[in-house]
Amino acid sequence: MLLINPRESDSIDKALRKYKKKFEKAGILRQLRARKAFVKPSIVRRSQLLKAEYRQKMMSEDQ
């Protein structure tokens, strides 16, 4: 559970912005989407390798 302790001077908008930022950093929504369906460990590893290769390729093209 995410808790926000807003100050007396903070507006509702500011407190909501803090909550949204904390929610995103915690990765709750990402975790829920990942748990929707089971993904085999071999497929997870494969996708991680493909992402790493893509990032490596993009970094080498920039230089």
Image (cartoon, grey):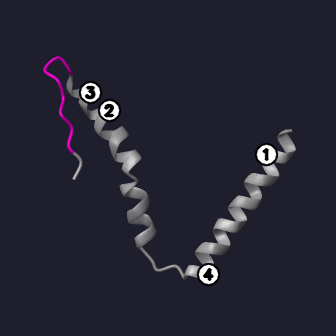
> Identity of the amino acid at label 2?
Arg
Instruction: Please tell me which of labels 3 and 1 falls first in the chain.
Output: 3
The reply to whether the C-beta atoms of the residues labelled 2 and 3 are less than 8 Å apart is yes
> Identity of the amino acid at label 4?
Ser
Point out which mark residue 12 bears: none
Q: CA distance from mark 3 to mark 4?
A: 44 Å
Point out which mark residue 42 bears: 4
Residue 7 inside the magenta-drawn segment: yes
Residue under pointer 2: 17
Q: CA distance from mark 3 to mark 1?
A: 38 Å
> Identity of the amino acid at label 3?
Asp
Q: Which residues are magenta?
A: 3-10
For this view, does 38 lie left or right of residue 43? Answer: left
Q: CA distance from mark 4 to mark 1?
A: 26 Å
Identified at 72% across, 66% down, the residue is 50
Identified at 65% across, 69% down, the residue is 47
Q: CA distance from mark 4 to mark 2?
A: 38 Å
Instruction: Please tell me which of labels 4 and 2 falls first in the chain.
Output: 2
Q: Position of residue 40 (x, y in %)?
A: 55, 82
Instruction: Please tell me which of labels 3 and 4 falls first in the chain.
Output: 3
Point out which mark residue 13 bears: 3
Q: CA distance from mark 2 to mark 3?
A: 6 Å
Q: Nearer the viewer, mark 3 or mark 1?
A: 1
